[in-house]
Amino acid sequence: MKTSVVRFSVSLPRQLARELDQMAGEKGYDNRSLAIADMIRAHIVEHRQQQGRGEIAGSITIVYDHHRHHLQDLLTDLQHEHRDVIISALHCHLDHDNCLEVLAVRGKASEIKTLADELIAAKGVKHGKLTITTTGENLPD
Ligand code: NI
């Protein structure tokens, strides 16, 4: 299906337009329209997640020491509780002590944020981060 295109003109300060073209080139965009379209999509995704509208997808990454007492059990319990939003999980043994876990998630923003907060706040988790993206639905490419 061919996407129909709308053309409109935008006025920018010359220096800002130069910076835009430079950034688009450095990021590998063929033209500034593609770069601007990606920026707009990123803002729409961010706006929707702030509004709490619909479903989100994303990933939760945590690093922890698996020797910490009860931590592994707690993290597993949390994941079982929230299994409806966890699509996939990846566990890597970084070194003798440290584990890296990446959870792919999809579902209600509020539940995913709660899950991420609980995992990251667990005693012994050294670092954690929730990265939110779109499910791709209702976002034109
Ligand atoms: Ni491990």
Image: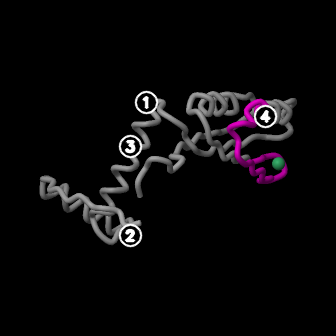
Whole-percent x, y for residue 107 in the image: 61, 37
Dot 2: few (<14), some (14–19), or many (≥20) neighbours within 10 Å? few
Q: Is residue 21 magenta?
A: no
Question: Which residue is disc 3 drawn over?
Answer: 44
Of tags 4 and 3, which is closer to the observer? 3
Mark 3 CB within 8 Å of ligand 1: no
Whole-percent x, y for residue 42 in the image: 40, 48
Question: Which residue is disc 1 drawn over?
Answer: 51
- Asked whether the beta carbons under mark 2 and mark 3 sit within 8 Å of each other, the answer is no
Question: Which residue is disc 2 drawn over?
Answer: 28
Amino acid beneath label 2: Gly
Quarter containing the C terminus: bottom left
Q: Is residue 97 magenta?
A: yes
Question: Which residue is disc 4 drawn over?
Answer: 75
Q: Which dot marks residue 64?
A: none
How many numbered marks, from 0 up?
4
Amino acid beneath label 4: Leu
Q: Earlier in the sequence, mark 1 or mark 2?
A: 2
The Cα–Cα distance between marks 4 and 3, rounded to whole angstroms, is 32 Å
